Image (tube, rainbow, N blue to C red):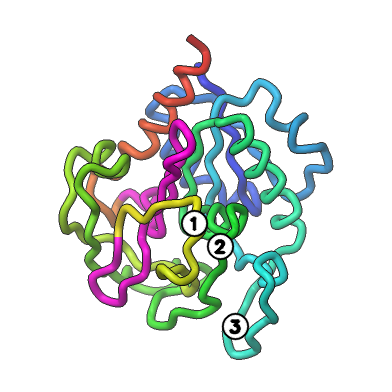
Amino acid sequence: MPRIGVVASSEDQAIPYLSALEPWGAEPILFLPDKSSKAEDLLRDIDGLLVTSGEDVDPVYYGQPKDSQAGLKLNESRDQLEFPLLREALRQDLPILGICRGLQSLNVVTGGSLIQDIGGHRVVDDAESKEPEYHRIWISPGSKLASVLGSGGQVRVNSIHHQGIREAQKSKFLVASAYSLKDSIIEAVESPYHRWVVGVQWHPENQSEVPKQFQRLFYALVLESSALRE
């Protein structure tokens, strides 16, 4: 049974991600911001990493001043936990799945930046109080993401974020594998330099809001992590 480290802001926030991993036989190990151990110690005996959604990444980590109009909600302790974990997981070439903030943190850790407020999307804190919003994306055929999902092309996903990246913000060490047809926001990235590193901007853990094939993202993370134990 592979051990998947799950980075989250709180136990409650982690629940849908843990539920999404459960059918695939993983043993989730929750990493919360109160952890004080070093990244190498936390990742000992961990086979893969799931970086969940959450608060905004502090712009100091990508060399920008805070935009006072962006409505930033920061969590310094989450940043301090997450970035060393991501760097160490990349160094060890562990399988990584980043979701929403997870994609954004992956981009920042590998040298990219963020658009502090893209506008027009449901923000995470208000997600439970509003009806689901959706937009259509294009998934690049031949990408790792398309391989996981079974096909590329157009698909509808949920819209729960107010930050993101376009080509100008994307890390040169990542490739884009999906785009929003509405505003050209990059909806998925992957690393060509690692065995399996994928980030998506939408929320596949909200299983009632997205096509069932998106659950294959969690299956793929568990499958790739299981290979480390063989």
Image height of 39 relative to 170, above or below: above
Could you tell whether 34 is left or right of 191 in the image? Answer: right
Camera-nearest label, 1 or 3: 1
How far apart marks 3 and 2 lie (CA) works out to: 21 Å
> Looking at the image, do the residues carrying marks 1 and 3 touch, with CB atoms under 8 Å apart?
no
> Looking at the image, do the residues carrying marks 3 and 2 touch, with CB atoms under 8 Å apart?
no
Image mark for residue 112:
2
Image mark for residue 172:
1
Q: Residue at x 54, y 25 (%)?
A: 27
Could you tell whether 149 is left or right of 57 in the image? Answer: left
The residue where tag 3 is placed is 71
Question: The disc labelled 2 sits on which kind of residue?
Answer: Gly
Question: The disc labelled 1 sits on which kind of residue?
Answer: Lys
Mark positioned earlier in the residue sequence (1 or 2): 2
Query: Residue 208: x and y, percent?
Result: 29, 52
Q: Residue at x 32, y 68 (%)?
A: 132
Mark positioned earlier in the residue sequence (3 or 2): 3
Q: Nearer the viewer, residue 142 or 182?
A: 142
Q: Secondary structure at mark 2?
A: loop
Mark positioned earlier in the residue sequence (1 or 3): 3
Image mark for residue 62:
none
Q: Residue furthest front?
A: 172
Query: Residue 112: x and y, percent?
Result: 55, 62
Q: Secondary structure at mark 1?
A: loop
Q: Residue furthest right?
A: 36
How far apart marks 1 and 3 lie (CA) works out to: 27 Å
How many circles with numbers are drawn on the protein?
A: 3
How far apart marks 1 and 2 lie (CA) works out to: 7 Å
> Looking at the image, do the residues carrying marks 1 and 2 touch, with CB atoms under 8 Å apart?
yes
- Residue range highlighted in magenta: 179-207
